[in-house]
Image (cartoon, rainbow, N blue to C red):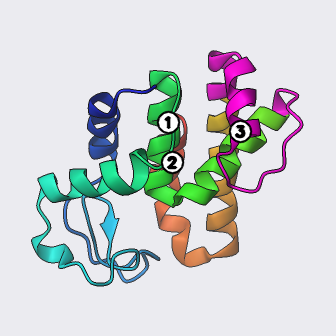
Amino acid sequence: MGDFAKAIKFVMKNEGGFSDDSQDSGGVTKFGISQKSYPDLDIANLTKEQAIEIYQRDFWEPYQYFDDRLATKVFDLSVNMGQKRAVQILQRALQCLGAKLVDDGVLGPMTKQAVDLANVDMLLTAIKSEAAGVYRNLAATNTNQNKFLKGWLRRAYL
């Protein structure tokens, strides 16, 4: 199982402080927690500790992550683009390595088994490639998002 303390340090390096960019589809965000996802939360006054609690409860604990590096990568993608999409990227990466999976975004027993059988280094490379493709597609289909592409691609390949 992955190490949450390591993973949250990685995610927090990628997530900034307060942002109210009208072109950001998440709306107002702080530490990567968006008003869109948490409409009843006072984002402007959110503390780093509260953000970490949310990440642990809502993004880490519901999923059984694996190797530290893999756990950190999938967790980071979940924070940035949502859990379902992050798991779909994981599943597509596993498909690239020969796994017979449906990319349904559910981290079920078949996906977990495929992860257990995969070479972690190869899987991480495939995840990074798949994530970059998703980011490029987001920017291509919504030109308002183009300004985020460079940062997204940097994040994809970390």
Q: CA distance from mark 2 to mark 1?
A: 6 Å
Going from N to C along the chain, the mark reached first, 1 or 3, is 1
- Name the amino acid, label 1: Lys
- Which residue lies under the disc numbered 1? 73
Q: Is residue 9 above or below residue 85?
A: above
Q: Secondary structure at mark 2?
A: helix
Report if residue 152 lies within the magenta region.
no
- Which residue lies under the disc numbered 3? 109
Q: Is residue 108 above or below residue 4?
A: below
Task: Please name the residue shown 51% across and 22% down the image.
Answer: 67
Q: Secondary structure at mark 3?
A: helix
The label number, if any, that marks residue 77 in the structure image? 2
- Name the amino acid, label 3: Pro
- Name the amino acid, label 2: Leu
Task: Point out the stretch of residues depicted in magenta.
Answer: 96-124
Front residue of 147 and 89: 89
Q: CA distance from mark 2 to mark 3?
A: 20 Å
In this view of the protein, can residue 132 be seen by the observer?
no
The spot of residue 58 in percent (x, y) is 38, 57
Front residue of 155 and 84: 84
The spot of residue 59 in percent (x, y) is 41, 52
Q: Is residue 69 above or below residue 84?
A: above
Task: Please name the residue shown 46% across and 50% down the image.
Answer: 62
User: Disc 2 vs disc 3: which is toward the camera?
Assistant: 3
* Mark 1 neighbour class, 10 Å CA radius: few under 14, some 14 to 19, many 20 or more: many
Going from N to C along the chain, the mark reached first, 2 or 3, is 2
Q: Are marks 2 and 1 in contact (CB under 8 Å)?
A: yes
In this view of the protein, can residue 23 be seen by the observer?
yes
User: Disc 1 vs disc 3: which is toward the camera?
Assistant: 3
Front residue of 19 and 98: 98
